[in-house]
Amino acid sequence: MPNIHETVWKNCLEVIRDNITFQAFKTWFEPIIPVQIKNSVLTIQVPSQFFYEWIEEHYIDLLKKTIRKELGVSGKLEYRIVMERNFSTQEAYTVNLPTTNKKSLKNYPTNMPIEINQGKSNGIPNPFIIPGLKKIKVNSQLNEAKSFDNFIEGDCNRLARSAGFAVGQNPGRTSFNPFFVYSNNGLGKSHLLQAIGIEVKNNFPEKTVLYVRAEQFINQFIDSVKNNSQNDFIHFYQMIDVLLMDDIHDLANKEKTQDIFFHIFNHLHQHGKQLVITSDKAPVELEGIKPRLLSRFKWGLAADLQTPDLETRIAILRSKLYKDGLEMPDEVVEYLAYSITTNIRELEGALISILAQASLNKKPITLDLARQMIDKFVKNTSREISIDYIQKVVSDYFNIPVDMINSKTRKREIVQARQIAMYFSKKYTKSSLATIGIHCGNKDHATVLHACRTVNNLIDTDKEFRVYVDELEKKIKI
């Protein structure tokens, strides 16, 4: 028979599960353990201080309602935070010489690492250590420009950024170990990975941090096999305090490399060292990776980076301009943000292209110049038409501010523009009626359906209206 506190918490979870996303529930509520109930106070155990703070900030209202539903108006919630693990900073490492190498230790310098492949390492100086060396100095391969200061926060990345910052503040001692970040290309995985590394270096200068792409790791392992130095290769990675592995999906179907990484992963994790891993897919969707590795990727927190919304895209552009000391008209910034919606890297590339075009040809940065550049740029990047982009085209065509389309006004010309935006959103995006409604003034799906029917009827009966729609459709499809 379950205890009363377990039953109460189970009932609470059933309500919570219906009110948040599956990923949020799995991340923030599944790890919680009910401890006791005393005097209408339910005590729950959470894995860390950061965990407690996140729940308090984002789910406190939902928790209050569910607790009071189960325990009455006097019901309260109390947290018990698991004490963070303390690991000794004194580690002993044993490094074996390759069996084919008969040199004595005195033939090696004792104050620096050696390179095993005669200076031809794959981007990492000194990838191996010499026997007996207990501390190494590693080029972390971090780009100082990729910090949290210029990693713009939005709804699309808030969870991943917050968790990453917590890792940077306290590496190896949060419940986010490993921290697994996944997304499509160009949404900031590598930036976040490097930002975590920079944060660790700022807070803990004595820690050994290494950013490495999986492709580099593979090439280094191949070199170690050729040189019969696999032991040195393994021990080098076992001495890293914070390992930042980018594009782990590149290990797919490389069984021997996966075996080596498995042992390195286990050693680091067991000794309280931090692992941060990125991939283009969630752990459950990765193919060609051994089950025992996949199970370890799921030990900590998996967080995705989603496509940034319009406000976040505008903020990214303005941040880059500010950082570079440049200016650009707001209408050009907004046009860029509306036109390129699915890839931050392409968005920043388009910004650089416009700035270069204006500078080299001594032209002012205007909306017309932006249109010329974006038309070429977007055609080469197979633009995905978005609701935001459609709203921008419609608002420009009717000379109406976008925020008016999304307002509650019932003025005829605004309502008609809103209906046309809904019509094209249904026609050219994969969004549901409910999603379109939310983006178009927080309307419900029935309103969107009515708008689409109204536009279809007017196309059939009003020639002037049909001209509007045809011209808009050409602009949207450019």
Image (tube, helix red, strand yellow):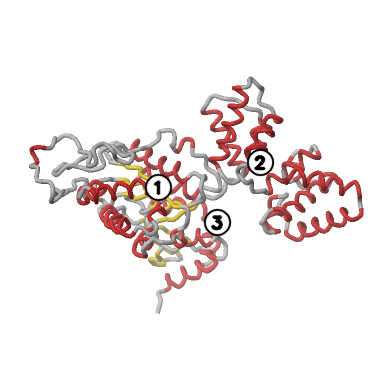
Q: Of the residues under marks 2 and 3, which one precedes in the sequence?
A: 3
Residue under label 2, please give it. Answer: 338
Q: Nearer the viewer, residue 79 or 75?
A: 79
- Location of residue 89 by image quarter: top left
Find the residue positioned furthest to the bottom.
1
Where the N terminus falls, by quadrant? bottom left
Disc 1 target residue: 246
Q: Earlier in the sequence, mark 1 or mark 2?
A: 1
Amino acid bearing label 2: Tyr
The residue positioned 7% from the left and 42% from the top of the image is 104
Along the viewing direction, whichever of 157 and 94 lies nearer the viewer: 94
Left or right of 231 on screen, residue 352: right
Mark 1: few/some/many CA within 10 Å (<14, 14-19, 20+) = many
Classify mark 2: helix, strand or loop.
Answer: helix
The nearer-to-camera label among 2 and 3 is 2
Kindly report the distance in space between the C-alpha atoms of the residues bearing marks 1 and 2: 29 Å
Q: Is residue 279 above or below residue 413?
A: below
Q: Residue 453: x and y, percent?
A: 82, 59
Q: Which amino acid does label 1 sit on?
A: Asp
Question: Which tag is nearer the camera, tag 1 or tag 3?
Answer: 1
Residue annotated with mark 3: 61
Identify the residue at horizontal 33%, vertical 60% (top origin): 255
Q: Do the residues labelled 1 and 3 touch (CB within 8 Å)?
A: no
Q: Give amino acid for label 3.
A: Asp
Q: Nearer the viewer, mark 1 or mark 2?
A: 1
Quadrant including the C terminus:
top right
